[in-house]
Amino acid sequence: MSKLVILVSNNSLDSLYHALTLSLSAKALSWDVKVFVTSEAVALFLKNSKRKFSLPFFARLFLKFQIKRLKINDAEEMLKEALAEGVEFYVDEVGLKVIGASKDDLIDGVKLSGSITFLTEAKESDVVVSL
Amino acid sequence: MKVIESDDVCPVILVKVLRAFRDAKDGEEIIVKTKWEAAVQELRKWCNETRNEYLGWSREGEKFVIKMKVVKNK
């Protein structure tokens, strides 16, 4: 089975959307897919009730704008589909702390990771994409 | 025959096709109806990669209708 690893390393939710697109397409080809998120985009992986806390006002405003602009319901739907199809999501603990969240705030199935996990997974992959 | 009528973005359609494929019997047809033209090419390539049979596509008003045949015994 082919394996895809995606690194989402900037603060753009656009990148996360592209990562979800690639993930679902790869799963449709029965590939193994792992997505590493190392930015403020980790906010999308928080339980609904926890999404807004601890973000500075302008960051929250920006996030709200981005969510509206990107029709984030679609992204959320894609995230649900990706999790249901077995895409593995890893979020960076530092990114999580930056937005004032913890492991307990993550939606089910999303794991914490560090750079070693990413590097070892990337080393064993057929395709690595950085967004 | 399984018919998927969806205007979801391409990857979501692909996942729906994958699920239909899992439930389908060998030789069964899967038909996708969508407004997304790129799905025509994406599903042809999906068939090539997964060794299912691409039967072609047509237009039905604003929709693109893509036909595939499931090949389970490869």
Image (cartoon, grey):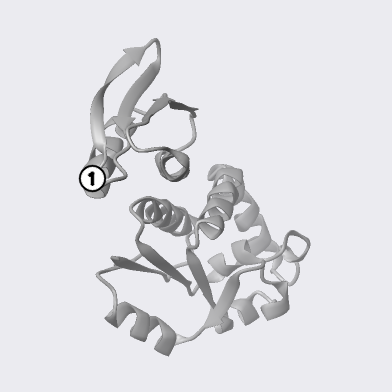
Question: Label 1: chain?
Answer: B
Residue name at image x 33 percent, y 33 percent: B39
Residue A10, above or below B43 = below
Badge 1 crowding class, 10 Å Cα cut-off, few under 14, some 14 to 19, many 20 or more, is some
Residue at disc 1, secondary structure? loop
- What residue sits right under mark 1 in the picture? B51
Q: Nearer the viewer, residue A26 or A97?
A: A26
Q: Residue furthest left?
A: B48
Q: Residue A80, how many percent across, how many down?
A: 59, 53
User: Looking at the image, which residue is at 32% across and 78% down?
Assistant: A122
Q: Where is A121 relative to A35, above or below?
A: below
Question: Residue A15 placed where, x, y %?
Answer: 43, 58
Residue at far right of view: A49
Picture quadrant of residue A52: bottom right
User: Is residue A61 shown above or below A112?
Assistant: above
**Residue toward you, A25 or A115:** A25
**Residue A24's spot in the image, x, y percent?**
43, 52
User: In which quadrant of the rendered view does residue A109 lie?
Assistant: bottom right
**Residue A102 can be seen, yes or no:** no
Q: Is residue A57 left or right of residue A113?
A: right
Residue A83, placed above or below residue A117: above
Between B17 and A96, which is closer to the camera in this rendering? B17
Residue B56 percent location from the top left of the image: 24, 24
Can you say which quadrant of the picture contains the N terminus of chain A? bottom left
A68 sits left or right of A123 in the view: right
Q: On the picture, is A69 further left or further right than A129?
A: right
The residue located at (54%, 51%) in the rendering is A81
Horizontal arrangement in the rendering, residue A71 relative to residue A38 (left or right): right
The kind of residue tagged 1 is: Arg
Instruction: Look at the image and tell me whether residue B9 can be seen.
Output: yes
Residue nearer the viewer, B49 or A15: B49
Q: Quadrant of the C terminus of chain A?
A: bottom left
